């Protein structure tokens, strides 16, 4: 396993529509392992493949809290959101590709996601609260969408201004 470099907002790979995964092989499973390791090293709860410069439809999540023995850790391939609730929630979000920024984002409260696991088996997830939010945030990455795009034009402009001040030098 290896920790990969996380690309920052401004890198064009974050704006691409990522490609479907077709081969469920050891290379894919190694990539998923690296994504988990990279996410944990960065203390994130979700990471999408474009965030390590790989434009494929893959993301990993770990939204478990200390008592949560069961679900909450997922590697999801070729995901589709097949249902979204009309009801929405507002909560703060951050992104490992936009370090230093946190903004309140409104999203559907509950979603149903269909995807494949790293073995190619179908999975269906019913998400609410943090799981729902994390899935929608990571799913957006696969379509070139960042959470700042979900803000009002004014809030987005202020956030982008702040980013110019706080972005790491590596972002150029
Ligand atoms: Ni993100």
Image (tube, rainbow, N blue to C red):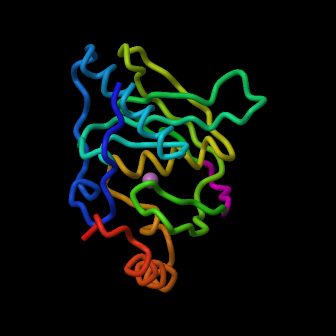
The quadrant holding residue 18 is top left
Total labels: the figure holds 0
- In the picture, measured across the screen, residue 29 lies left or right of residue 147, that is left
Q: Which residues are magenta?
A: 85-90
Looking at the picture, how far across and down is residue 152, in whole percent? 50, 78
Quarter of the image that includes the C terminus: bottom left
Quarter of the image that includes the N terminus: top left
Task: Examine the structure image and report whether residue 96 is included in the region drawn in magenta.
Answer: no
Q: Nearer the viewer, residue 87 or 77?
A: 77
Q: Nearer the viewer, residue 15 or 125?
A: 15
- In the picture, measured across the screen, residue 37 lies left or right of residue 86, that is left
Looking at the picture, how far across and down is residue 153, in whole percent? 45, 82
Which residue extends farthest front? Answer: 169
Which residue extends farthest right? Answer: 67
Q: Nearer the viewer, residue 89 or 131?
A: 131
Residue 14, placed above or below residue 78: below
Looking at the picture, how far across and down is residue 79, in whole percent? 40, 34
Q: Residue at x 62, y 38 (%)?
A: 63
Q: Residue at x 63, y 55 (%)?
A: 86
Residue 65, placed above or below residue 148: above
The quadrant holding residue 117 is top left
- In the picture, measured across the screen, residue 171 lies left or right of residue 108, that is left
Q: Residue at x 57, y 35 (%)?
A: 62
Looking at the picture, how far across and down is residue 41, in whole percent? 48, 40
């Amino acid at each position: 396993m290896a920790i990969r470099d996380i690309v920052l907002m401004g890198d064009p790979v974050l704006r691409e529509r990522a490609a479907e995964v077709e081969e469920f092989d050891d290379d894919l499973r190694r990539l998923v392992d690296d994504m988990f390791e990279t996410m944990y090293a960065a203390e994130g709860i979700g990471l999408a493949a474009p965030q390590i410069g790989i434009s494929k439809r893959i993301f990993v999540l770990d939204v478990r809290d200390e008592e949560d023995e069961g679900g909450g850790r997922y590697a999801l391939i070729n995901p589709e959101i097949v249902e979204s609730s009309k009801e929405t929630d507002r909560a703060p979000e951050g992104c490992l590709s936009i370090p230093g920024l946190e903004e309140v984002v409104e999203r559907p409260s509950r979603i149903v996601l269909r995807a494949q696991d790293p073995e190619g088996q179908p999975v269906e997830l019913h998400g609410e609260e943090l799981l729902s939010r994390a899935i929608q945030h990571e799913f957006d990455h696969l379509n070139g969408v960042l959470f700042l795009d979900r803000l009002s034009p004014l809030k987005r402009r202020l956030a982008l201004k702040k980013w110019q001040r706080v972005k790491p030098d590596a972002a150029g």
